[in-house]
Image (spheres, grey):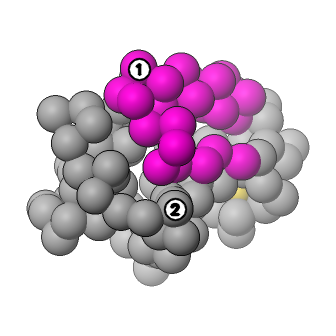
Amino acid sequence: MSQFCCKLFSMSDKIKILVCTESHCKKRGAEDIVCALKEQRACMGLKDDVSIKKSDCLGMCEKGPSVYVKGLKLRYKHVDPGDCKDILRSVCGKKQGELKSPNFYVPD
Ligand code: FES
């Protein structure tokens, strides 16, 4: 299931994941999220398909650590390192029009 979907897309379709590493999110382990996402991305063979970058505040400070997927406009709140595999699967699934994962978050 790992290299399942993202290889279907061209480099211009590269998925861009932003992880807020500003103060609120940093205090709640944002750096661990960046590491976990990168580790999981490597395990899933998605390095060429998914970019993971630290970002400024994403406007969900009280819900951090916060993750945002550019282009797809997906937002995740209270992210834990254990969520990273599901996030990557969900993001790839969204690209294919599959159902959202249970931790999918739609902002108010
Ligand atoms: S500090 Fe992370 S969303 Fe604002």
Say if disc 1 is inside 8 Å of ligand 1. no
Q: Residue furthest bottom?
A: 108
The image shows residue 70 at horizontal and vertical percentages of 56, 69
Q: Which residues are magenta?
A: 28-53
Please tell me how crowded label 2 is: few (under 14), some (14-19), or many (20+) other residues with Cα within 10 Å: few
Residue 76 relative to residue 28: left or right: left
Q: Which residue is mark 1?
A: 43
Q: Report whether residue 104 is seen.
A: no
Q: Amino acid at mark 2?
A: Met
- Using the image, tell me which numbered label, if any, was put on residue 72: none
Residue at x-position 83% and y-position 58%: 56
Q: Quadrant of the N terminus?
A: top left
Q: Which residue is mark 2?
A: 11
Tell me, yes or no, whether the two marked residues, 2 and 1, touch with CB atoms within 8 Å.
no
The image shows residue 46 at horizontal and vertical percentages of 43, 38
Q: Nearer the viewer, residue 70 or 67?
A: 70
The image shows residue 104 at horizontal and vertical percentages of 32, 57
Residue at x-position 78% and y-position 35%: 26
Q: Earlier in the sequence, mark 2 or mark 1?
A: 2
Residue 14 relative to residue 96: left or right: right
Q: Judging from the image, what secondary structure is the residue with disc 2 in?
A: helix
Residue at x-position 79% and y-position 60%: 57
Please tell me how crowded label 1 is: few (under 14), some (14-19), or many (20+) other residues with Cα within 10 Å: few
Instruction: Report which quarter residue 43 is drawn in.
Output: top left
Q: Please, is residue 30 above or below residue 89 in the view?
A: above
Can you tell me which quadrant of the image ligand 1 is in?
bottom right
The image shows residue 83 at horizontal and vertical percentages of 39, 32
Q: Amino acid at mark 1?
A: Cys
52 drawn magenta:
yes
